[in-house]
Amino acid sequence: MDWVGRCIAESKTSVAATSITLTYGRDAEGNESHARAAILSYSDVQKYFKRLRKAGYPCRYFVTGEMGSKKGRAHWHGIIFWKKKVPLMMKDFGNNAWNGWKPIDPVLRPIEWNKRFYDPCWPHGFSHWEPVRDGTMRGSIRYVCKYIYKDVDDGAAQSKLAMSKMPPLGAEYFEQRAQKFVQEGISPQDRFYQFPNEATQKDGTPLRFRLGGKSADLFCQHFIDKWREQRPGQPWPHSDWLEEYEDKQTRTEWDRDAEFAPALKPVEKRWPMQPPVGFTDADITYDVEVFAPRIGTIESGYQWYYANAEGTRGWREIAPIDGRPIYKRSVTQFPERLIPSQWVDRLALKWVFWITSAIPSRGRYRLAKIQPGQGKSVWMRSLME
């Protein structure tokens, strides 16, 4: 139904429409099994419309390709929308290589209607042209579309649907429709449109077609642009559809801006714990006197991060083990509380600490380098020495 509605809309901005069938003839040696009829070659159709345009007949199209039921040969059905004029005669340069005809000078060949003929722009076989008359566009489009579903249950069947896309079929008609809304000072309230003289139900009620996809977006944008141009400073009447479109456009712009925005370099985190409120990771230092992270100043007061007797870790205003430096503890007390090694081993820290050994050695303090997983062994070796 969407294709029917858009094709009818395209016909409203064309001088005429023609239903065509393109088939393949015999090959250059006279064999009926033409090599290009074995599969659907869409490039053949593309070149066909390019030749028409080059001959001076700008057009747009809607085509489907299928394999014949009887002989299994490829052929194409479609609708051509002529934008300026309909060809009556075309020059034939003898490019139908399969029949071996090569004229010295190009020959004007008339277009033959309602019968197959040698089409100068279709060098592979025959063309069949029929004019699409007023009131019959719906039936013509449905006839073309039915070949898409002919072998829908056959996984090996070939089929192809193609159409003009830049812009989508019917775009010019929908732009004109948007202009009418602006002229009348009203805004579109829904996506539906109809053609009372072209598409009706059995009881005579006009069929309602629903505008969607790219065509709907183009219609909304045409309306907004024309309204702002022709009615500057005047807001258009409320429309849920237009608001939905504007919201979508805004989200798209945000996503695009986010995609091309410079990537923010993540802040390097030096400590595994979160600092207290009002401080940052950079404010944390290591207190070698009590072997625990510390934060704060003398004026504001210090806080230390360690586990209490219950094993709960957190920031506390009292230093570990009653605030006494580790070198003031007794030797019998120390092995029972290997706080530095436990803290390093359990948290698997990635940084390296330089700490002062607990027991003086020859009047000076020994420096021990503790790495993750090595804290306990280093401390025990220091004590033994």
Image (spheres, rainbow, N blue to C red):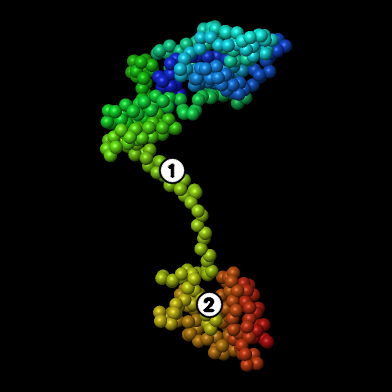
Vertical arrangement, residue 286 with respect to residue 141, above or below: below
Which residue is painted at 47% across and 73% down in the image?
A: 283
Labelled disc at residue 68 = none
Determine which residue is flagged by label 1: 252
Q: Secondary structure at mark 1?
A: helix
Q: Give the farthest residue toward the front.
A: 105
Q: Nearer the viewer, residue 207 or 231?
A: 231
Confirm whether residue 351 shows in the render. yes
Figure label count: 2
373 or 129: nearer the viewer: 129
**Marking on residue 286:** 2
| Residue beneath the point at 49% across and 74% down | 284
**Residue type of the residue flagged with mark 2:** Tyr
Left or right relative to 119: residue 60: left
Q: Position of residue 275 (x, y in %)?
A: 46, 70
Residue 259 image position (x, y, % from top left): 49, 48
Of the 4 image quadrants, the one containing the N terminus is top left
Q: Observer-nearest residue: 109 or 325?
A: 109
Task: Say above or below: 261 vs 373.
Answer: above
Q: Is residue 286 above or below residue 129?
A: below
Number of residues whose C-alpha sits closer than 10 Å to that of mark 1, classed few (under 14), some (14–19) or many (20 or more)? few
> Residues under labels 1 and 2: Cα distance?
48 Å
- Which residue is pictured at 62% across the width and 24% down the height? 156
Q: Label 1 is placed on what type of residue?
A: Thr
Determine whether the residue tagged by mark 2 lies in a helix, strand or loop.
Answer: strand
